[in-house]
Amino acid sequence: MAAFLDIAPEAVRRLVDGIAELYHSSNAYHNVHHATDVLQALYVLLADLGALPKLVATGHSEWDARHSPVAPLDALALLFAAIGHDAGHPGLSNAYLGNAEAPIATAFRCAAPHHDASVSSASSPAAASPAARAPEGSPLESYHVLLLEGLLERCGLSQLTWAASGSRSELGSLIRTCVLATDMAIHARFVEELEAFERRLYGDDGAPSTPAERAALIRARPREERTLLCSALLKCADVSNPVRVRSIGRRWSLALRREWERQSALEAECGLPATVGGGAVACKHKHGPHKTHAGTAPLPNATTGDEEGLRRTSAAQMVAQIGGGGGAAADSAELSVDALVAAGELHEERSLARGQVAFVRFFVTPLLDTLARIVPGEWHH
C-alpha cells in the first residue's frame, strides 16, 4: 500500500510507534487498544471492498483497486483516521467538558454540546450532510483531529494532509471529516443522510446487479458523497464491538461502563449535571445531589425509554446506562449461570446483555444495513 501511494515506509513506522503516546493508558475504554481495534475492523471492511490488499491468500491473482468503491488514497485516509480518531481522549464526554467549561471545550468555541435535529437543508444535498461540516458541540472530535495532524507532521507525512497554500489537502480534509463524524450525538442524522445518499445513488431502479457496476457508480459521485461513504465505514468500525463474538463485545461494554462510572462520580463530586445518570450506572462515589439508584433509569433527554429516546441518547450513554453491573465476577470472559448466581451478579449480567442488544438495534443495525445496501462487498453477506 505504501509503495502503491509512494509513501516512505519509515514514515509509516514512525506513525505507528508514536500513536500510543497520544492515548491515555488510564482510560478503561478510550485507549490505544480501542484505536487498534477500530483500525483492524476498518481494515477488514476495506479489504472486503477491494480497497486494500488482503494479507492472506485468497485465490485472486493480484489486487486491483479499480474494482473498489473506495479509492486507494481514501482508504489510506481512513486508516489514518481510524488509528487517531480518539487521540488524546480524556475518558470524559463532550457533555461533561461543556458543562465543566473545560479548556478543550472553550478552545474550540464549544459550550455544552448542542445538536439540533431540525437542521435546515442547504441547496446542495452534500452541504446538508453532517459529515460535510464540523458539527457544533464536538470539541473532543476536533481535538482528536488536531493531535493526529500534529503527529502526521512530525512523522514526515504533512505533504499528504496539507496543500502548498496552507489549507488542508483532499486527504487531510477527508481525515478530519471522518473523525468528526464519529461524534455519536449526530448519529441519527448521519444515518438519515446516508439513506438519502442511497436514494440519490440508485434511484427507483435499485442497485446494479454486479459489484463492479456498483463500485464504478460510487466512484463517479461527487467528493462530498464519497466522503460521506468513507465516514460511514469508519463509524461502522467504531461501533462494531457489540456485533463481535459475545465475549469480546462484552469486555468492551464493561470497559466503557467503567469509564462512564468514573465520569458520573466526577459529576457528582463537582456538582455538575448528571449526563450519564440513570439506574444501571451503579456509581460507587459518595452520595450527593446527583446520586444514582439502580432501577431509576430514565434515559438522558427522554421521558421514557422509547425508540426516539434511545436514538437521542449517545452511544456511550446507552452502553453505560443500560449496561448493568460488571463487578469482580463479571470481569472474566465467560461465566456460568451458577457462577453469576453465586456472585450475586446474574441480574447485572442480564442487564449488560440487554444493553448490548439495545445498542445494536438502535445504533448499529440502521447504520450497517444502510451501508450494506450501498456498497458491494463480502462482509455483509
Image (cartoon, rainbow, N blue to C red):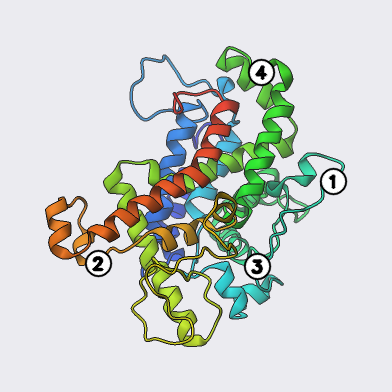
The percent coordinates of residue 329 (x first, y second) are 19, 62
- Residue at left offset 53%, top offset 33%: 369
Q: In this view, does 125 lie above or below 185?
A: above
> What label sits on residue 113 in the rendered view?
3
SS category of the residue bearing label 4 = loop
Circle 2 sits on which residue?
327
SS category of the residue bearing label 2 = loop
Circle 1 sits on which residue?
122
Q: How far apart are marks 1 and 2 (CA)?
A: 49 Å
SS category of the residue bearing label 1 = loop
Mark positioned earlier in the residue sequence (4 or 1) = 1
Q: Which of 126 and 176 is in front in this view?
A: 126
- Residue at left offset 62%, top offset 80%: 101
Residue 235 located left or right of residue 381: right
Which amino acid is tagged 3? Pro
Q: Quadrant of the C terminus?
A: top left
> What label sits on residue 27 in the rendered view?
none
Which amino acid is tagged 1? Ala
Instruction: From the image, state whether disc 3 or disc 2 is nearer to you.
Output: 2
SS category of the residue bearing label 3 = loop
Q: Nearer the viewer, residue 328 or 306?
A: 306
Q: Distance between the residues labelled 3 and 4?
A: 38 Å
Which amino acid is tagged 2? Gly
Circle 4 sits on which residue?
206
The percent coordinates of residue 93 (x first, y second) are 53, 68
Residue 105 located left or right of residue 4: right
Mark positioned earlier in the residue sequence (1 or 3) = 3
The quadrant holding residue 152 is bottom right
